[in-house]
Structures are given as structure tokens and as C-alpha cells.
Amino acid sequence: METSAAVGATRSRTAKTTLLSEVLAEADATEMPTVVAWLSGDTTQGRLGIGWRSLANLDVAPATEAALDVADVQAALTALVSATGAGSRAARTQILGELFGAATATEQQFLIRLMTGELRQGALAGVMVEAIAAAAGQPSPLVRRAHMLTGSLPETASLAVHGGADALSAVGLQVGRAISPMLATPADSLEAAHEALGPDLVVDFKLDGARIQVHRDGDAVSVFTRTLRDVTAQVPDLVSVVVGLPCRSVILDGETLTLTDDGRPRPFQETMSRFGSMADSPDDPRLLRPFFFDCLHLDGTDLIDRPLSERLDALDSVAGHLRIPSAVRPTLEETRAQFDAAIADGHEGVMVKSLDGVYAAGRRGKGWQKVKPVHTVDLVVLGAEWGSGRRTGFLSNLHLGARDPDGGPPIMVGKTFKGLTDELLRWQTEEFPRHETHRDSYTVHLRPEIVVEIELDGVQRSSRYPGGIALRFARVVRYRPDKTAAEADPIDNLHRLLPPNGS
């Protein structure tokens, strides 16, 4: 508890790493994965099914002396998720009462924040990886790679502590286990991206869809979102396509979207809502269409460390007909034509990629650069003000924050109410209170969980907001339920939009 508070109180990445590594070094080897999960704001049991109101209304006097240990809390959390069926509500109430009755007031607050997903002490994955490496005495690059391939900080910690360098080195791709997707860096311009990565590059359409990672092992297919959520059961249309590919095993990276009758992309929100319902027939407009741009494994061979040119050859051999429209080794004029074609077809822009680059799982690699016709950033909604006039009774003006790259809470950079349709106003007025921390007469303040895509003309220096900058002519494009706050744009990306004179 003390470490969590101390980590949350500092903006220094070095200090965070030191604090975390010290507490991890003190943990028993069997407890370390659990401690890693907790200090990352997660539980090893996954979703506990306990709501904020249930815990807020829990009237249990705190213990006067600390007596709980890691094993005690783990056992209680496991019992919570195991309590199902008839009588489960009473059983869960009893488990919570006994757990909170044995906890001090400070421990109760920590448990509430942990169990509701509100533990925001700034232990981002990158910081925790460094802390695990220091505590286990293992090289950071080795721990970082193992985390990229397992997608699990607790599992990585267990490997580092129990198996050391040999266990970490042995981690490879596993068909059926999602890995963190490679991300792109915003380009300064189309010309700058072409010059930086050319001449051996490929220019893909940047589709306005949902990121997917598909795995196939024989007849077994798994489909994951960009946040590594398994949505296989919700997308039988995608599964049927992957099962029909001419291979035994494969891992493909790509996008999926719904299309209009003339082949243009439907609005992003329609694609995202499709994950909550089934398409009824091949003619159903909700049918998801897959488009792939990378191949990480094919028929027993891992390709993640191979150059993109080889990965694309593998992709063409098994799913060339599903490849995202792309131009290989284009001239600058051909790159401009590819960008214009993507926009004309209703897509977001293009991705410019180095053909020599490897797949940097879980990282924003300079080898992938995205180019859009306007500046857009993904920011975190920190709160919303009650509207006036026509918007009276609706939550309207949004408080927006950029991600702190050092793991602190999001940094406020501006407000906007522009771009909010009547439908979005109704939605956020209903949804935001579910993420509320507190409110005053003007504003409902939120846990940093909701990501929104914002279009802006640029930024300017300003002392009005903690970030030292302010958004210029910001407007809402859409909400991004496919992204977490950890995937929002860091404030560094906004600083790069400052004009040369910094004004």
C-alpha cells in the first residue's frame, strides 16, 4: 500500500522503477507475480464482478492493526470469483465482509481501488518491466521481450524469478496466445515519412476499422482485439474466413470493418458495435470483413524477427486476397497517389512502413509511420461539464488529458464541446456517471478510462492547463472503445505539433 501511494506521488520514471523494484525484491518468489499484478492495477483472477457501489456501501469497521498478507487477499479474491450459482450473492457479501474486516483503513482503500480498477499509481508496463528486471537481476531487454510475447506482466515476473535468463530466452510466439500489437508513430508529413523510410518501403491504406490479431492452429481459431480481448465467439464471420486459409497454423495482424454496398467503410462505431451482435447472413450489413497487413507466424515458423518484406511474402502466400491495399517501393509521387486513393475510398490515410523492419511488439516503432489528412489524437476524458441552453441536462464540455509517458495520471491539455452530436450527448450523459469519482455543481469528474479521438488544427503554448499547452479548434471525432487509457497519445506527441517558434 505504501509503495502504491509513493509511486503515484512521483512523476519520475527512475523513482517509480526504484520503488517498485525494492518492493518486488522483498516479495516471496511465489508472491511476486501477484504483487506485480496488483501494483499494475490488475488482479490475477481477472474480472471480479464487484461493482463500485457494492464496495462503497460496504459498512465494515477497519482493523486497528495490519494483519493481512498477500496470500490472505489472494485467497479471498479467488473465493469471490468462485462463488457462483444459488446463494452466491450472500457468499460474496460474507467474503467481502471478512476481508475488509481484517483490513486497516488504508488497506481498505487500496482494496477498493484495486477491485474497481481505479488503482492508478502510474506503474505502466514499461516501468514495471524495468522493476522486474532489477528485482530478478535479469537484463532489461530479455525481460522486455518476454513481456511482449507473453502479454502478461505476472507471467513475465514468474519466469524471471523462477527460471531466470534461460526461461526468459525460451519464450517465443505461441499460436493461440495474443501478443501486444506493434503501433505506429505519427509522421510529420507524407513526404517526411517517405524520405525517412524509403526507398525500401510499403504504403498501406490506413483503414477506419478495428484492429484484430487472428491465430489459427489446425481448426482452432482465436481472434483478439488490440487490447488482447478474446472476441472469437462474437465474430464467426471472421473465424470462417481464417479456417478456409491454405495453412496449418498462422498468426495474422490486420483490421476488420463493415462495408457499404459499394465497398466503402461504414462508420467506425458501427464496426465496434458489431462485436456485440452477430451477423445473420453473408448479406447482413453487419458482416465483418478482414484485411491483413502482417504475418507473424506461418506453419511452424515464427516470423516476428524477420524483416517486413519476408513477412509480407508469407502473407501473400496464404492470404494475399485479404491483404490491405498497398504500394511496394513507390516513388514519392506514387506514395501521394496512394494517399489520395485511400482518402477517396473513405479511409483514414496511409501507413508508411520500412520493408527492413522487424515487428516491435507492444511498441511504437519508427519503422511504421501513420499519415492522416488532419491532426488527430487519442485523449483521455477526465470529466465533463453540464451543458446550458439547448444542452441543458446533458453532460457536454469535455475535459481532455494526454498520457503521461512517465506513468503519472493523464495531463490536462484542454476542453471541447464541438463535434458532439445529439446521439453522443445522450450516450455520454448516460455512460459517464458509471466512471464517476466525484462531482460539483458544474462538472462530473471521471476515472481515466474513456478514450476519445480528437481532431485539431494544432496546439499552442498555454499556462492555463498543467500540460503547458492548449488544443486549437479541437472537436470530437469519435469515442475509441477499442483503446485503453494506456494507449492514448502521450503529451510528447502534442508538443511535437507546436509551431517552430513555440507559440
Image (spheres, rainbow, N blue to C red):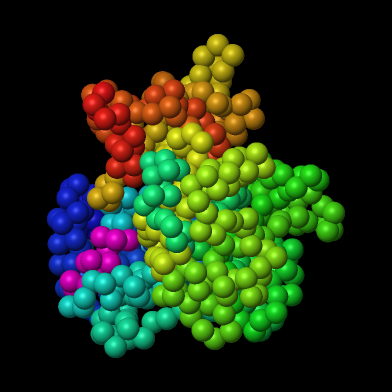
| Residue 46 shown left or right of residue 14 in the figure | right
- Number of labels in the image equals 0
Occupied quadrant, residue 13: bottom left
- Percent across and percent down for residue 313 are 57, 73
Q: Residue at the spot x=47%, y=53% of the render? A: 352
On screen, residue 12 above or below 159: above
On screen, residue 216 above or below 167: above
| Residue 257 shown left or right of residue 331 in the figure | right
Q: Residue at the spot x=31%, y=57% of the render? A: 124
Residue 222 visible from this viewpoint = no
| Residue 160 shown left or right of residue 186 in the figure | left
Residue 139 visible from this viewpoint = yes
* Residue positioned most to the top: 389
On screen, residue 192 above or below 228: above
Q: Specify start and end residues of the magenta stretch as a single range.
A: 125-136
- Percent across and percent down for residue 489 are 38, 44
- Percent across and percent down for residue 154 are 35, 72
Q: Quadrant of the C terminus?
A: top left
User: Which residue is at the front of the view, 8 or 359?
Assistant: 359
Q: Residue at the spot x=41%, y=67% of the render? A: 356
Q: Residue at the spot x=64%, y=62% of the render? A: 323
User: Which residue is at the front of the view, 348 or 18?
Assistant: 348
- Percent across and percent down for residue 281 are 84, 58
Residue 364 is a magenta residue? no
